[in-house]
Image (cartoon, rainbow, N blue to C red):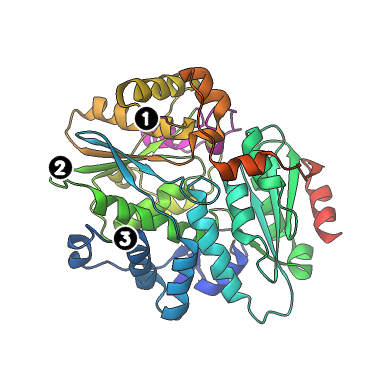
Amino acid sequence: MKLYSTNNRALIASFREAVLHGLAPDGGLFMPKDLPRLPGDFFRTLEGRNLQDISFAVARALLKDDVPEDILRRIVEEAINFDAPLVRLDDETYVLELFHGPTLAFKDFGARFMARLMGYFVQGADRELTILVATSGDTGSAVAHGFLNVSGIRVFILYPSGGVSPTQEKMLTTLGGNITALEIQGTFDDCQKLVKQAFVDQELREKLFMSSANSINIARLIPQSFYYFYAYGQLADISKPVVISVPSGNFGHLTAGLMAKRMGLPVTKFIAACNANDVVADYLRTGQYKPRQSQKTLSNAMDVGAPSNFARMLELYGHDVEKMRADVWSIGCTDAQTREMIKEVYEKCNYILDPHGAVGYWGLKQYRAANAEQCAGIFFETAHPAKFPETVEEVLGVKVDVPERMRDYISKEKQAVLLPNDFVNFKAFLLG
């Protein structure tokens, strides 16, 4: 696979280079020059195939020239050793549960695959690989657990002070070892900005071998495409148009789905379900992209005012808003509407949503109201509701069962370094 920078199409890198460097030297995101088209037989035989089998088939189509087949199969089998079941809520509505991994969030797919891929690529390297990652919630814990004790790799996780739930904070700050949590006195956008500044700083580039585990790294997006194919294969009826609603913050999750569509996945429309940080919804409505300071919401993992992966979305559609509108519909959701959706789904279906899944359900519901068409609607439940007990239990008045592995994290002591929102201090810490 050859990739180019979203800032300069003439800047070309191999897949290994793109994975190990994260960002292009000019600060752009790496984007595949071409995506393979999967044959029609692949989609006709999806039903009944397990997630690992589908994941390997998609990974092989993308990476057959970059990773030996036996290594790739081992990476898939080790990384994706849990399920993503499609649960039917009514005749036309389904929820894809993406929280069955070790940290109970969809980020486990990308983080575990990336950790093993990077572990393979750094074998024999003459210096340690430094991973920098900004998180607004579940990315941090997924990356921490995915990379824990991976030889030759050191991880620094930046998260906004007071900007993640107490449970999420415990899950990303209690591991130690090769994982260091940095509590930044700012927003997620500030954390993301510090990471991006580090990658283009000449002194850091000379002294440290750096990469990222955010969705700015192409290795995160590839495994996130796998479960789109798996969800389609689990649908009982594909005679109706298929619509998928994706809770969207930094837009890596949605971009992976759009890449799957380029590979042939027959999805009619993607819904970018946003919270109050709805700059992409505004772009699709007005044609003007205006990033802004992020707002704090109940669906905190989506609190992003300047989504990095929007650059990749623009590349997919040639910076043409009309072409993007043909595939993507978007709407924002308030905290009050988030609470309303949690309550509605519980009362109608006896199913408990987390705030992010509630935003996804809201997006699907509003799309149907606006378009008055019958469709097989899938929305993503991206995290276990037990990660957000303050919100869910307040809305529903019931206790949420806490999985045993989460209780183990909560009982541990937080280990984090508090830093100001300042690049000079951040750089000094990395070099120190």
What amino acid is at disc 3?
A: Asn
Q: Residue at x 25, y 54 (%)?
A: 233
Residue at image mark 2:
240
What amino acid is at disc 1?
A: Tyr
Rendered location of residue 225, percent (x, y)? 39, 56
Sort mark 2 into few (<14), some (14-19) or many (20+) by Cα contacts within 10 Å: few
Q: Which mark identifies residue 63? A: none
Rendered location of residue 120, percent (x, y)? 57, 75
At mark 3, the secondary structure is: loop
Position of the C terminus by quadrant? bottom right
Measured in 3D between alpha carbons, the distance from the residue under mark 3 to the one under mark 1, in whole angstroms, is 24 Å
In front: label 3 or label 2? 3
Measured in 3D between alpha carbons, the distance from the residue under mark 3 to the one under mark 2, in whole angstroms, is 23 Å
In front: label 2 or label 1? 1
* Magenta-span inclusion, residue 99: no
* Magenta-span inclusion, residue 298: yes
Range of magenta residues: 276-301
**N-terminal-most mark, 3 or 2:** 3
To which quarter of the image does residue 330 belong?
top left
Rendered location of residue 365, percent (x, y)? 30, 28
Q: Residue at x 71, y 52 (%)?
A: 175
Position of the N terminus by quadrant? bottom left
Q: Is residue 74 above or below residue 83?
A: below
Sort mark 3 into few (<14), some (14-19) or many (20+) by Cα contacts within 10 Å: some
Q: Which mark identifies residue 50? A: 3
In this view of the protein, which residue sits in the foreground, 240 or 281? 240
At mark 1, the secondary structure is: loop
Residue at image mark 1:
351
Q: Is residue 358 above or below residue 209?
A: above
Q: Residue at x 22, y 65 (%)?
A: 42
